[in-house]
Structures are given as structure tokens and as C-alpha cells.
Image (cartoon, grey):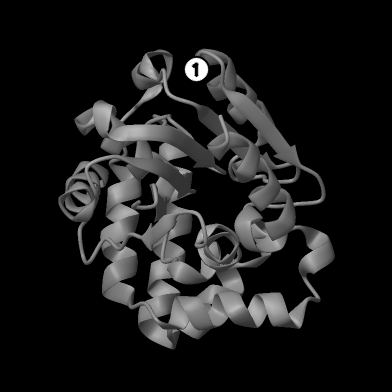
Amino acid sequence: MAKPALLLLPGFLCDKTVWQDQTGAFEKDFDCSIASYDMLDSLPAMAAHVLKAAPPTFALAGHSMGGRVALEVFRLAPRRVSHIALFDTGCDALPSGEAAKAEKRARQRLLDIARSRGMRAMSYEWIPPMIHPDRWQDNELIEEIVRMMERSTPDRFEAQMNALLARPRTTDLLPRISCPALILTGQNDGWSPPERHREMAAAIPGAMLAIIPQCGHMSTIERPADVTRAMRDWLAR
């Protein structure tokens, strides 16, 4: 008998590294695959690309930007999604006014560093706000993230940045999710805070909510055992 499919969507400039603990935990019982987005520069285009390579039905988990792609996958093919999990993410569009300008400036500054000084230099600027302060001296974790970023390029950075700046608002999708859903974030995720995830979980009928303590934005590799435990409960539903 074929194993059920588990499709994992990485976030901004991320790859299989962010899902390594989860694929190790679930590969015995699930056919695990990790999506890539090539050089696509829109979230709907990424979702369409993911669906082309996806099995007929699958459980779907997305981290950060991957959570937004997961919602676009659900928009395009809701009947193919047996379960959906959204980690450290959001469903808002780019805000208006000064907030939008500030986000664009912050992202552009990092892109400028990537182009002028390289992806490694950019990653050292990008990482600290993304992980719990207790992990700032965790050289093994930081080097793992840095190496992942080095496998990407400034051009891919710009494409994914543009996708995020043009992100669609997806709050309308949440009440339409009827499959088992898991909403998860780090207690200390300043980029995708717990309150946002509580609101998302409240909008999805029957959704599970997991707030991981002492954890920042990179939950799947900061607290892999906690994330895997929550996923195991979700997939068993």
C-alpha cells in the first residue's frame, strides 16, 4: 500500500534544511517531499508550480513564506489537501503607508548587502531577529542557517522578496478550511507573533493551535521535537 503524502513548503530562501528533523521523523509512514520555487516571484505562481509536481492528495505544511504558499495551494486545489499546517506565517497583505515603506526598506537593505557583500554577510544580518535570543550563541544552529542561505543567490532573494511584497490577503480562505488544520508559531516570534496565529486558528473551524515556548521564527529547527510532536497529533486527526 502506498504511503500517504506529506508535502513540506520552506520559507524565504530556505530549503530542505528547515524540514530535516520532520522528514526524518515522518519518512517511515509518509511519502515526504519538499517543494522548491525556482526563480518565481509571486506566491500564486509558486503555488501553481508546487501543485504541478504534487501527488493527487497530500497533507500540506508550510513555514513562513511557505505558509503563505500553502494557503495559495489551498485556494487553487482545496480538495487535494487532506491536512494543512501553517507555521510562523500570516495571511495579511502588505500594509499601507509608513509600515509598507519600512518593510520595503528593511528588505531592500538586506538585498543590497547580499549583492554587495554576499549571501553569508546578508545572513548574519538576517538571522538574529529570526531566532530566540538564547540561540544567538548557538554556533551550530547559526552556521546551519548561514550555509542554507549561501546555497541561494541574490537574484532568488529579489524574486522571493517581490513575491512577499506583493502577497495576497488570504483571510477569506481561513473559514473555508474544513480539513484538519494546525497553526503553530514560536512564543517569541516577533516577525509572526502568537496573537496573529491565535486569530488565524480562531478563524479555522476546529483548528489546533500550538505556541512553542522559548522559540523564535525558525521553529522547525529551533525546537524540532516540539514541532514534530504537534505535527504528529495533527496528522493523526
Disc 1 designates what residue? 204
Q: Depth check: 194 or 63 in front?
A: 63
Q: Residue at x 70, y 61 (%)?
A: 222
The crowd level at tag 1 (other Cα within 10 Å; few <14, some 14-19, many 20+) is many
Judging from the image, what secondary structure is the residue with disc 1 in? loop
Q: Depth check: 15 or 98 in front?
A: 15
Give the vertical position of 200 relative to 30 (above or below).
above
The furthest residue to the front = 1
Question: How many circles with numbers are drawn on the protein?
Answer: 1
Quick check: can you spot residue 104?
A: no
* Residue 223 picture location, percent across and down: 72, 57
* Residue 31 picture location, percent across and down: 39, 57
Quick check: can you spot residue 151?
A: yes
In the picture, measured across the screen, residue 187 lies left or right of residue 149, that is right
Task: Classify residue 167 by image quadrant.
Answer: top left
Q: Residue at x 60, y 79 (%)?
A: 144
Give the vertical position of 203 relative to 41 (above or below).
above
Task: Classify residue 161 by image quadrant.
Answer: bottom left
Q: Residue at x 50, y 17 (%)?
A: 204
Tell me the quadrant of the picture where the C terminus can be found: top right
Amino acid bearing label 1: Ile
In the picture, measured across the screen, residue 223 lies left or right of residue 99, that is right
* Residue 55 picture location, percent across and down: 24, 49
Q: Depth check: 91 or 97 in front?
A: 91
* Residue 148 picture location, percent across and down: 49, 77
